[in-house]
Every structure is written in structure tokens, then in C-alpha cells.
Image (cartoon, coloured by chain):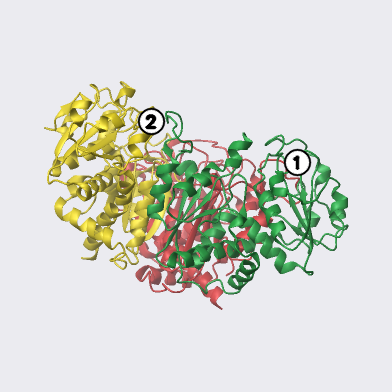
Chain colours: A red, B yellow, C green
Amino acid sequence: MNNYFSIQDIDSLSDWLKEAIEIKKKPLANKTLGKNKTIGLLFFNPSLRTRLSTHKAALNLGMHVIVMNFTGEGWSLEYEDGTIMDQGNSEHVKEAAQVVSQYCDVLAIRAFAKLKNREEDYREEVLNGFIKYASIPIINMESATGHPLQALTDAITITEYKKTNKPKVVLSWAPHPKALPQAVANSFVEMMQKMDANFVITHPKGFELDNKITKQVPIDYNQENALKDADFVYVKNWSSYVDYGKVVSNDFSWMMTKKKMELTNNGKFMHCLPVRRNVVVEDKVIDSENSIVIEQANNRTFAVQLVLKKILEKLQK
Amino acid sequence: MNNYFSIQDIDSLSDWLKEAIEIKKKPLANKTLGKNKTIGLLFFNPSLRTRLSTHKAALNLGMHVIVMNFTGEGWSLEYEDGTIMDQGNSEHVKEAAQVVSQYCDVLAIRAFAKLKNREEDYREEVLNGFIKYASIPIINMESATGHPLQALTDAITITEYKKTNKPKVVLSWAPHPKALPQAVANSFVEMMQKMDANFVITHPKGFELDNKITKQVPIDYNQENALKDADFVYVKNWSSYVDYGKVVSNDFSWMMTKKKMELTNNGKFMHCLPVRRNVVVEDKVIDSENSIVIEQANNRTFAVQLVLKKILEKLQK
Amino acid sequence: MNNYFSIQDIDSLSDWLKEAIEIKKKPLANKTLGKNKTIGLLFFNPSLRTRLSTHKAALNLGMHVIVMNFTGEGWSLEYEDGTIMDQGNSEHVKEAAQVVSQYCDVLAIRAFAKLKNREEDYREEVLNGFIKYASIPIINMESATGHPLQALTDAITITEYKKTNKPKVVLSWAPHPKALPQAVANSFVEMMQKMDANFVITHPKGFELDNKITKQVPIDYNQENALKDADFVYVKNWSSYVDYGKVVSNDFSWMMTKKKMELTNNGKFMHCLPVRRNVVVEDKVIDSENSIVIEQANNRTFAVQLVLKKILEKLQK
């Protein structure tokens, strides 16, 4: 693995999941692996879990961490080739990526979708720009269209909590006051197709994700029907892919409630966080014993630590 | 001690002061105590002294430090229970505190008063929210109503400079162009009641602090009278507690001057900094030999290092 | 050397250049020199290369690094003596510099020109304020009128690439949509007068730099003439010194092009970055084999590491 751009960079998911759970048992077992190695964390957008868990994982491996916020501390970059750069962007990613590669050993980057132009977002110009020009490994800390560290976390969490070999997992769309990217949903959908799971997506009409990602995954527009006998209920809002970036409906009847959870097979409630209580999910659900969102967030550290460990091992060769 | 929320968390002030002065003599004596431990510094407001001194103290104890600015890098949190979170706040402190507890071993938090609503500020929802939901120790780096690291610093400084067992200490209100919180004054008043001191507060009418904090401390509305024979003059602005958050008067005759200092017993001038020169205090006072503000700021490191040391020692048990 | 404020603080340039190239070969050779020492990086303006390379160099020397952004995390400082501080500035540099000196062992500061008032900028009140009041060494990470770490980098780069003892070096002004400071140009001009080089400056009329800095350096208003037989072409925009801070002309015919580079002696293209492509320089030039901007940026680490090493060695005495 050179980069961790998407979950397609995972060669053997079952091996990765085993190793992540080993790391969780002994997080300091590889304290010298990252000695004298520096990871640069580049944030083009706000972050809490990803920022702290990545920092912590790097420290667990003995690495140095340099954090750089482009909002406020830096400037905006140009990604197009051949542009006459007489507008707002002060530097081309060609230079930025090559230069930063000389100060760090690994880079991790967060750059959200702008939700203005679908083609532009799905082109992934920030991550792909850095991957193209950097000379060091790149880790995706949530890009325009994917959040593969979250999806790896989710796979670890489902593996820990599942009671059957092939659990039923439901991704259930939720209402939200703001237009959010499809990144978390996309990576989760990809991951569920890699795992041994009976996977269903449920959302109102108009919220269909990119069918190059959902492929053959069944979509049920009837939420209650979809939830029946679910072992895991993963709730998440996203804005429309078809009518790109729009909140085409904000039907609050799609909020996850205790009553709906009763349709499941004593299902576990999952969410990537941050979550808006009593909009996305009722207090009674997230505060119940079946909510595993805190442990899920805990696994963020071990997901990214596994990715970093694999990158460091390859660098040592 | 589980948390350092207020100076009520100090079990034996005299022991603490002795230990702080020992730490100051040999700041690196406990360099391995914090090994593999991480402190998260969460800032909801700007900081200079607190930020740097806390970072430095943690390094002196061998800890890792992760700094997180919620302004700019993060988002705003919800603190009320049962809210329908369809407005500006993206995450509830319930999740934030539990999650962050999994990435760090100790948390230190700065969250100023908003000065809009007295009940809300004095409820200390940010600090109390984190204390309620976090599973790790919390340190107050200045909250809505208290600044106990500053008060501990002040106690160390007075201990170092006092020439008698029971010095006369005067807290003297000062004018200021902006409305400032009562936090520093409150914690100082609490601390002076714990120390062996002849303590007086002087301010214009309308600036009375919360009488649950001032209790029996004498208040003298005549500044010159209060200053007579003072060994320490602690100058600080605060906005009104009664007419909450208002600058009910900005009487520049309350500025500390050389002439007024002549009324004291060759008194030392103290201020927590930052200070507005020639508004709060005349140049001639802060630049005089009797000004101990720089040494006072130096003691910030040893105050917070003592708190951290006590927390780490308890974590080791 | 107490501070690295300008290139006048370099005692023997030839020795420094030799040592920098040694550091580049073995960047971790002095990994214990900075043990238990902390550098504070104070940013009053955005930074990418300087921020990361200084952080990295400090880590290479085993130092701790504390980063402080005054925009957002801190507040604005007062630099004038005797001011009545009832306006926007919350703290005087007298206190800030003395206090920060107590938490760090070395300070590095970035504070750009405001380009409003020439006398004010050339007085260098931020850097000089800190140098006056701090009790620890200060490093200039680009001030109002100079960027001596960049100039040292440039000298290292020219030394590595030069094919003759006295290469021809041309500083060529470039157009830019925004008014930029003279800092990089000033320090480069000073450095070229210290090096053994045949140095020429070329720019449109009205962009003359301070003649106390350019002294006897020839200025050629004919760019093509100046470029003839150049071994190194250093391209940079700056706003007017005479009509201070103004973009008195934005003649895009001054952009560096492939056709112009053909006039040189197979000259190397240099720029401090960030650079606006197809405004300052044509893609064909910066993407050519003769462009050494990436290696130039790489040398930023070794320039600042040399400065830090010299400061640490002096602190140890």
C-alpha cells in the first residue's frame, strides 16, 4: 500500500481487521516503529475525532506530528493545470505537494466536498492533486467523496459486536438542517460490500447515492421495512447526489427513534459523529445500551494506527 | 483530586505551595511521570500565557500535548439536555466529552463567560458538561466564573514575596474599555480567603462580586483608604455582577498610579496579564521595581505543573 | 550570535554554507543538542514552508516545538511606548516578550509588513520589540523588511548548483495581482552582496528598493539585457518602495518566460514560493529541468537547522 485513499487500498480486509484488534489490545507495542518519522496533518476543514485520533495513533507509534490548518494559517491552493493564477489561489498543488513531501514522511489530508459541482467534487482534486505530486504516502482523513478511515473503523466495530457471521446491516438516511457530503455514506457502502453482511440502504426517493458505488446493494424506500431484524443500524445524513448537494427533502419522520429500533433484532445503533440529537436520532436511542457510537469513535485511533503501521513498515523496507 | 475545576479542589494549600516551589527549583525532576500520557488542550477562547505555560509544564513532565482550537478548527457544542439540535450547534457535549476522553489521558479546557446571561455563565455548562461526561481528569484553564490556575499562581507568588506571615493584600478594580469576566477576581478572592492574609477588596459601587464568593471579605469603596499599608496590590478589571456583564462605570480615576502606590507599605504590584498600560495601570507602576507581574507569569508554569503532577500521580495508582 | 534578525548576524558566510551542507547530509547528527529545549513559533501571519521546515529542523535537533498563531488564537499587541491602551491592542510587547521568554528557550517570529506606512514597517517594531524585551534568542521567520532564513536558503542553493566561482545572478521583478512586501527581495539583495557573485537587479521604473540595501548593485530597467548569460534567475514580485506599498505597474510582459530564459547561460530558475503560475512565471519555465524551486524549498530545513544549531550551541556554553 502506497496511499490510503479509499478502502480499495485494503488488500485483505480480514487480515486488517485482525491486526486492528491486536493493535487495540496493545497500542504501544510498536512504539519505536515511527522513530524519527514525521506525519503532517493538513486540514482544509474542521475536525475533532479525526484530528485527535490520528495525532494519538501517530504518538502511539513514536512519530512526530505537525498539524497545519490551511484555513487561517495557510492559503488556498490551485489544482487546475495551466491556469493563469491571478485570482484568489496563491500556490499550485504541484509545488505545495512536492515541498511538503520534503518536510514530512507521511501526509494525512482532510478536504471536504464543496457541494457546488458534482463533477468537480467527484474528481477529488485535492487528494488526487497531492497523490499525484507528493513523493510520500498520503492518507485520506475525509475527502470530497470518501472517508475510508471511518469505514475501516466501522468494519472493526461491527466485527467486535456482531453475533452472527453475516449480520444484517442497514444504512438509514436521516434528516439534517445543513447539506452534508456523501463521503461517509459512500465509504460505508463500499465497505459493506467487502464484508460478509446482509446490507440494505434506506432513504427517501431523491437521495440515491452514486450507483457506481452502490452497485447491486438493495435500496428500500420504506425505512420500517428495511429495519426489520437488523443487527446494526447505521444512521447518517447526506445531501442529494442526483440533484447535487441539495437538501431535496428534510422529512423529520426519517429520524431514528426507539420505536423504529424495536423493529430490529435488538440492533446496535451506529453513527460516525458528530450527531445532532433529536434531529438525526432520538435521545432514547443514542443514550440506550444498544448505542455503540462511543466505542465506534474509540476505534478511530486503532483504524488509523493500523494504516500508519502498514505505511511505516513499507517505508522501512 | 479528580479534577482541578476550582481552588476548592486543593486539599492542603500549604502543602501545595511548598511543592510548587520545589517544582520551580527542579522543573525536570519528574520527567518520566507523564511518559506515554497525553494531555488535550481544548480552547474555546484565545490564550497566550495559559496555552504556553500548560504546554511547557506538560513537556516538563514528559507528556505528549495535543492542542485543539474549537474556534476555527472545530465546531460549537450543545450543552442543554433534550434539545432538538437543528440550530448552530453540531455536537452535544455528551458525545464530545466521552469521545475525547478516549484519545487523551487528561483534558484542560478554556471557555470564557459570554456575559449575556448570569445564570447561564454561573452554571458553568462547558466545564461542568465535560466533567459530567468525560472519563478522564479535567483541568480548568479559565472558565466562565473562575481561573483557579491563575489563583494558584498568585498564591505561589505572594508566598515567595511576602515579608510577614499575614500580609495585607488589596484587590483593586481597574477601568477597561471592554466588558471582562469576573473569573480572575472570583478565584483570587476565594484564594485569599484560604491564605493567611489581611484581605480587602476595593471597587466603585456597582461592581460587587457574587457575595457567595466574597462572603465576609471587607469591601472598601474608597480606593485610597483600602491601599493604605498594603503589601500586595492586585489590580484587575471585571464587569458588573449585579447589572450582569455591563460596564456600569468606567471611571479612569481608578487606574493604579505611582501616587496611589505610595500609600502602600512599599507594596508589590500584581496583575494576571494581559494588561492595558495607562488604562489599568500607569507605566510608572508596572515598570517599577515593585512590579512582580513577570515573575507572577513565570509561576504559571509551576502552578499548572503541580496540578498535572498530582493528576498523573493519581492516575498511576 | 544572539539573534538571527538579518543576514548581518552571519559572522562567516562561507563557514555557514559549509556547515549547512554538512547538516543536509546528516540531519539527525545533532539529535541530542536540543534535548529539553523548547522553541516557540509565533505567527502573526500565515506560513507553510517556514512553519513546517522550522518545526522539522527543531525536531531534527531533538527540541520541543510550541506553535502559537496570534491570528485567531491570541490577540493583537501594542508596540509604542507610553500609549494609553484603550483601543484594539490588549497587551504590550514589553509584557508579551518577557513572559514568553520564561516558557521557551528560543523564539521564532513571523510578522509581515502592513504596507501602509514605510517608516513604520522599516522600523520593524514587532521583531525589534521582541528582541528588546525578550531574554531569549529570537529568529526572524520573515519580518516587515527581511526574510533572512530564505536568503540563507538561497545562498545554500546557489552554492550547490553553481558551476563557476562567481556566477551571474539576476533578481528579476515579476507582476502579481496583490501588493507584496519587499522582505524577500531585500534579504536576497543583501545576501548577494556577501556572496561572490556578479549580481544585477532588473525591474520596471518605480520598483527601486531601498538604496541603503541595494547600495552599488547595478539596476537594469531592461529585463532582456539583464538576463543575458545569467547562471541564476531569481524571480520575485514586490510592491513599490518609493510609492510605498503601491502596485505602481503590473506589466505582465515582465513574467518570466521560456523565451527569456533562452537568453541566459542555461540559467537555473529560482523562486521562494508560493508562486503564481503564468503570472510570475510561465509553466514551461517552472516545470523545466532548469527550475530548482523544489530543491530550494528543501534547503529551508537546513538553513533554519543551522541557525538553531548555532543558537543551541551558544546556549550550552
Rendered view: A246 above or below B161: above
- Depth order, front residue of A77/C247: C247
- Depth order, front residue of B171/B45: B171
- Residue B237, how many percent across, how many down? 31, 31
Which class describes the residues within 10 Å of circle 1: few (<14), some (14-19), or many (20+)?
A: many
Compared across the picture, whether B316 is left or right of A36 comes to left
Q: Quadrant location of residue B151?
A: top left
The reply to whether discs 2 and 1 touch (Cβ–Cβ < 8 Å) is: no
Q: Residue at x 52, y 65 (%)?
A: C310
- Residue C208, how many percent across, how many down? 75, 42
Rendered view: A82 above or below B36: above
- Residue A133, how many percent across, how many down? 67, 61
Q: Quadrant location of residue B284?
A: top left
Compared across the picture, whether A148 is left or right of B172 comes to right
Compared across the picture, whether A94 is left or right of A142 comes to right
Q: In the image, which is nearer the foreground, mark 2 or mark 1?
A: 2
Q: Distance between the residues labelled 2 and 1?
A: 41 Å
SS for tag 2? loop
- Depth order, front residue of A186/A113: A113
Establish whether labels 2 and 1 are both on one chain.
no
Label 2 sits on residue: B278
- Residue A18, how many percent across, how many down? 43, 72
